[in-house]
Amino acid sequence: MEFDDLLHARRSVHEYSDETIPESTLESIFEAATLAPSGYNLQPWEFLVLRDDERKSTLKEVANGQDHVETADTAVVVLGHTDPMAHAESVFDDWLAKDYLPSEEVREALLGNVEGMSEMPESDRRTWTTRSTALAAMTLMYAARDHGVASCPMEGFGADALTEAFDIPDEYEPVMLITLGYAAEGAADVENERKARRPVEEIVHYGEFDPSEETTLGAADD
Amino acid sequence: MEFDDLLHARRSVHEYSDETIPESTLESIFEAATLAPSGYNLQPWEFLVLRDDERKSTLKEVANGQDHVETADTAVVVLGHTDPMAHAESVFDDWLAKDYLPSEEVREALLGNVEGMSEMPESDRRTWTTRSTALAAMTLMYAARDHGVASCPMEGFGADALTEAFDIPDEYEPVMLITLGYAAEGAADVENERKARRPVEEIVHYGEFDPSEETTLGAADD
């Protein structure tokens, strides 16, 4: 689909049909997500993909009982590794092989930088992994819609209950949940007028940062 | 452009031509960014847009001297408000007006939820705003490329030096920088083979989370 159409066609959908997403479609969607950029190309993202009723029901329990976690064909737990070093050596080997780096010495220097990032306080490591992982998550949602698959990103869940229920090691940050499925016919989220967005003149500041004290949501929006 | 082409055409570009981005193009790019989803549609994002040499030079100083901050036509400081309540009242008024909420009582209950989120520890508020703001940032980069404008997301900057240099209030998290401009002819980042991505079989886990201990970057990639 043309990106401009995709942009307007993507909505956060809570009502799904019973139709199953073919495995090859899911595969293409995740393949697309890998093409997102990330700091130093470190790609901290991992995706736990839940498709059977029992696991989706467990996820629903830790996600404030939100129904669409269960009714969507697929629920994805989007995770980010909080240690920048996790994949650094392989990533810089690739840079060296492709002439993005002039020498082994520069590779070592970059590794030193990333080692320094590994020693950041926990709060910084959490925002670090959330930043890149969310870029992949957004890519995933556009790719899904491009394949006709609706999505809904969610942040309402108990992180501790989630990591415990699915045996997720401490070094991973649960960044968000995303439900995936074909929209139900007449789904309200598709039919209703889109929720209003803060206008460009409120959020964009040329030259100086002078944020508005008011929120002026457009009356109409697509 | 077709999304699948856009996905492959988007590269993080460090070498830019001297061509100026028309204001109307920038406007369209930011307009697109507003269509990103966000938790409760709270849209914590703000964009400080720097186009003159003096301000870009100041930004370069706090961004580890990275040249492309200055040589790009436009440098964007992507900021996220760390208080979920900042725009909540207007957002829920919009939900009520568009029948996303059945009653004033439900609006009050949602506001109560968001008030609770406002009391999260600082680390949680930082990851909260980074999550939604990065979704808008990714949308911005795809929209830019769709208009022929190359981008480069950057996380290498001193947050304190940045907020001081541009008088950014404490309640905003500097989420990332993005340079925008037309790619220079023959720009290495466009011509070179794309940096390798971790393959789907390494990052996607069906049913159970069982992350790989190894990093297996594909030998070739597009």
Image (spheres, coloured by chain):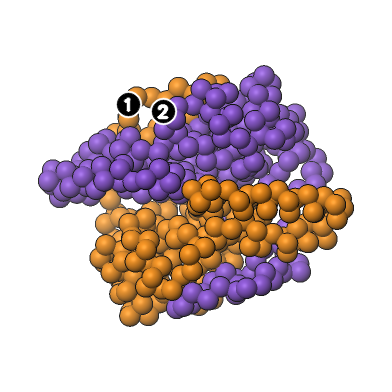
Chain colours: A orange, B purple
Q: Is residue A60 left or right of residue B80?
A: left
Amino acid of disc 1: Glu
- Between circles 2 and 1, the one closer to the viewer is 1
- The residue wearing badge 1 is A214
Q: Is residue B135 left or right of residue B176?
A: left
- The residue wearing badge 2 is A202
Amino acid of disc 2: Glu
Rendered residue at 38%/61% (across/down): A159
Which circle's residue, 2 or 1, is located before the other in the chain?
2
Q: CA distance from mark 2 to mark 1?
A: 9 Å
Q: Answer above or below: position of B77 versus A34.
A: above
Q: Is residue B207 left or right of residue B115?
A: right
Rendered residue at 46%/78% (across/down): B208
In this rendered view, identify the residue nearer to me: B80 or A127: A127
In this rendered view, identify the residue nearer to me: A182 or A57: A57
Q: Residue A15 at what x, y percent from top left? A: 29, 64
Rendered residue at 52%/41% (across/down): B175
Bin the neighbour count of mark 1 within 10 Å (Cα to Cα): few under 14, some 14-19, many 20 and up: few
